[in-house]
Each structure stands twice: as C-alpha cells, then as structure tokens.
Image: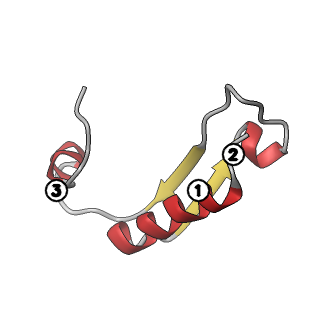
Amino acid sequence: MIEDRLILDAVRRLLEGFRPQRIILFGSQARGTADSRSDVALLVVCSIQGSGRALHLARPGQTHG
C-alpha cells in the first residue's frame, strides 16, 4: 500500500498545477484493500482550453510513452 503522505503530495501538486474542480481517489487505495502491487487511481476533473494531449505534453517533468 502506498503511504497516505505520498498520495496527499500528489493531490497537492495536482491542485497547484491544474486547479481542478474535483479529485477522486478510487480503486484499492480508496477501498483500503491495496497491497504492495497496487497503484494509485485518481480521477481529476478540470476544465482545459485546447487539446488535452497538448496540455499533457507541455507539463514539465512528464514522461511520454
């Protein structure tokens, strides 16, 4: 299971970078059933102008693949 502080840090960075209307944690982390193989599933709801792909590519530090 991923530590809560790491999830909260990711949420903080999303809030700063995108100013979303809502961030929803779901999946095993939200249910409390996560194990060492679990990832973090976040749904980020925000308005954007233009292409979502262009926004993704413009974010510094992102990996593209």
Looking at the image, residue 32 sits to the left or right of residue 11; the answer is: right
| Classed neighbour count for the residue bearing mark 1: other residues with Cα under 10 Å, few (<14), some (14–19), many (≥20) | few
Label ID, residue 6: 1
| Classed neighbour count for the residue bearing mark 2: other residues with Cα under 10 Å, few (<14), some (14–19), many (≥20) | few
Find residue 30 and report its horizontal and vertical position in percent: 76, 48
| Classed neighbour count for the residue bearing mark 3: other residues with Cα under 10 Å, few (<14), some (14–19), many (≥20) | few
Give the alpha-carbon distance from disc 3 to disc 1, as whole Å.
Answer: 30 Å
Give the alpha-carbon distance from disc 3 to disc 2, as whole Å.
Answer: 27 Å
> In the rendered view, would you say 24 is above or below 57?
below
| Secondary structure at numbered mark 1 | helix
Find residue 10 and report its horizontal and vertical position in percent: 50, 59
Mark 3 and mark 2 lie on one chain; the one further toward the N terminus is 2
> In the rendered view, would you say 27 is above or below 50?
above
- Mark 2 is on which residue type? Phe
| Secondary structure at numbered mark 3 | loop
Please name the residue shown 73% across and 39% down the image.
Answer: 1
- Mark 1 is on which residue type? Leu
Give the alpha-carbon distance from disc 1 to disc 2, as whole Å.
Answer: 15 Å
Please name the residue shown 49% across and 70% down the image.
Answer: 12
Quadrant assignment, res 20: bottom left
Looking at the image, residue 23 sits to the left or right of residue 37; the answer is: left
**Mark 2 = which residue?**
26
**Mark 3 = which residue?**
50
> In the rendered view, would you say 34 is above or below 15?
above
Question: Of tags 3 and 1, which is closer to the observer?
Answer: 1
Find residue 37 and report its horizontal and vertical position in percent: 67, 25
> In the rendered view, would you say 9 is above or below 2?
below
Looking at the image, residue 23 sits to the left or right of residue 13; the answer is: right
Quadrant assignment, res 48: bottom left
> Which of the pair 65/21 is nearer the observer?
65
